[in-house]
Amino acid sequence: MPANATAPPRTDLNEYEDYARLGALLTLQQPRTDAPAELSFLVVTQIMELYFTLLRHEWESARDVLTRPGADVHRAVRTLRRAHGAQDALLASWEALRTLTPAEFDEFRDAFGVASGIQSYQYRHIEFLLGARHPRALAVHEQTPRIHAELAAQAAAPSLYDAALKLLRGRGFAVPEGLAERDPRTEYQGDDRLVAVWRAVYCDQPRHGDLADLGDALFDTAERHVRWKQRHLLSVWRSMGDKPGSAGTSGAQWLERGVHRKYFPDLWTVRDQGWA
Ligand code: HEM
């Protein structure tokens, strides 16, 4: 038993409050109505924004590790795996909204007007890091120059997958220069030559184990993100049916179009053939 096991807890708790910035954090949960379900909606929204922030940090870090000469692939994979924990927690956050009925949602929906998750710039950062770089996504932020500039920089920087392409080329795989050095502002659509590269990696894991781990970690990242989008769509169907969204989209139908997206497409296509 440790020597101080029976010691009373310390009472000078200000350190905790300072570190976690509770004074600021706990002033931010201010619903706009008295509707009983609004606080859960607001808190879940804030929690998800915090997780988007964390994912952005982890994925930028993994991307930067992979683009360095002599990349430490193990470190990048560890970072992606740590982020999987955040993605799982993000996904679980939907549970707090699972009972929200259309009637309960309507009690506070007007209070946030045209506010919509489509304006979430942290979400857009993580989509850009995943390689989803639709030019219209930037236009939403034209009226906020700092946010627009940060997003434009992200859209011009390599995605996680662009970083993997450079790494594979650097390790001697037949990644055409035009793909490894492609303009990141255009969206990568997948390429049969890269499917062949991943197949070669997976077929010879004793030699390329770290790259196979990277492929798996990227695939797991993509799959978790798709699951978040699917769960969002389910919540939308449940809480507002097929009504238009607050940003003026068709709502669930608009979201449905993006819900089957295969981020890092070569890693999905390689599964068509499998590997020994
Ligand atoms: C039951 C609660 C929710 C409903 C009914 C809902 C509804 C919608 C709808 C209809 C859209 C389409 C755009 C529009 O016209 O507004 C949308 C987009 C979006 N929502 Fe939600 N939402 C909910 C909860 C959340 C939460 C908690 C978050 C977390 C921050 C979130 C993040 C987003 C994001 C990031 C988009 C843009 C998706 C994209 O660009 O592909 N939503 N939401």
Image (cartoon, rainbow, N blue to C red):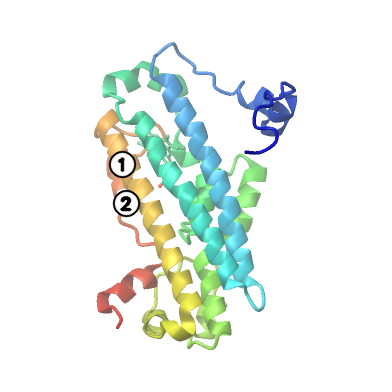
Q: Where does the image place residue 50, in percent across and percent down from the top left?
A: 55, 39
Ligand 1 within 8 Å of disc 2? The answer is no
Residue 142 image point, x, y percent? 58, 44
Q: Residue at x 64, y 51 (%)?
A: 150
**Which element type, helix, strand or loop, lies under badge 2?**
loop
Say whether residue 138 is visible.
Answer: no
- Residue 190's place in the image compared with 128, above or below, is below
In this rendering, the answer to whether 24 lies above or below 275 is above
Q: Position of residue 17 (x, y in %)?
A: 69, 26
207 vs 50: above or below:
below
Q: Which numbered marker is on residue 128?
A: none
Q: Residue at x 62, y 27 (%)?
A: 25
Query: For the residue labelled by badge 1, is the local secondary structure a helix, a strand or a loop?
Result: helix
Q: Can residue 246 be spotted in the picture?
A: yes
Residue at numbered disc 1: 233
Whether residues under marks 1 and 2 lie with C-beta atoms below 8 angstroms apart, the answer is: yes
- Identified by mark 2, the residue type is Val
| Mark 2 Cα-neighbour bin, 10 Å: few <14, some 14–19, many ≥20 | some
Name the residue tied to disc 2.
259
The CB of the residue at mark 1 lies under 8 Å from ligand 1: no
